[in-house]
Image (tube, grey):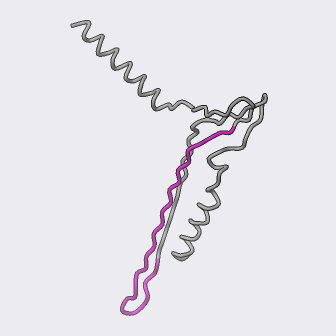
Amino acid sequence: MGSLALLQSLRDSVLTQASVKTIYGEPIAAQGKTIIPVARISYGYGAGAGTGGMGETSARGEGGGGGGGVHAVPVGVVEVSDQQTRFVPISDRKKLTGALLLGVGMGMWLNRRRRS
C-alpha cells in the first residue's frame, strides 16, 4: 500500500466512525422518559512513510506504516421527560479514588500525631 493510499484509508476510517451516535448512544424510552447515553470519545491516528531514494545501481525500496486507536468514556445521560430535560453525570472513579486515598492518608497522619 502506497503512502497516499494509507493516508486516505486512515481518513476514510475516521470519517466513517465520527458520527453523533458515537458520542450520543441510541435513545432508550422507559416509564415516560427518554434516556440518551453520552460518552467522551478520543481518536488518535498516525502514519509515516518514506523511500530509500535511488542508489548507484538500483532503486531502493519504500516503506510506511500507520495505526490508530479509540478511547471512549461514559460521562452521563440526557434524561428527557414531559416536565424537563436534564443531564445526569456519571461519577468519576478517579476523583473517588483520590478522595479515598486522601482520607486514608489523613487518617494515618492523625494517628501518628496522636501517638506522639
Question: In this view of the protein, which residue sits in the foreground, 33 or 99?
Answer: 33
For the view shown, which residue lies furthest in the bottom direction? 57
Report the magenta stretch's main SS: strand
Going 54% across and 47% down the picture, which residue do you hit? 71
Q: Position of residue 82 (x, y in %)?
A: 75, 31
- Is residue 94 in the magenta section? no
Is 85 on the left or on the right of 44, as rendered?
right
Q: Position of residue 12 (x, y in %)?
A: 61, 66
For the view shown, which residue lies furthest in the front direction? 83
Tell me the quadrant of the picture where the N terminus can be found: bottom right
Is 26 on the left or on the right of 87, as rendered?
right
Going 26% across and 7% down the picture, which residue do you hit? 114
Question: In this view of the protein, which residue sits in the foreground, 108 or 11?
Answer: 11
Location of residue 5 with respect to 99 vertically, above or below: below
- Is residue 48 in the magenta section? yes
Q: Position of residue 25 (x, y in %)?
A: 68, 44
Tell me the quadrant of the picture where the C terminus can be found: top left
For the view shown, which residue lies furthest in the top direction? 115
Question: In this view of the protein, which residue sits in the foreground, 55 or 73?
Answer: 73
Is 112 on the left or on the right of 90, as rendered?
left
Q: Which residues are magenta?
A: 36-62
Q: How many marks?
A: 0
Q: Position of residue 60 (x, y in %)?
A: 43, 84
Q: Quadrant of residue 13?
A: bottom right
Location of residue 7 with respect to 58 vertically, above or below: above
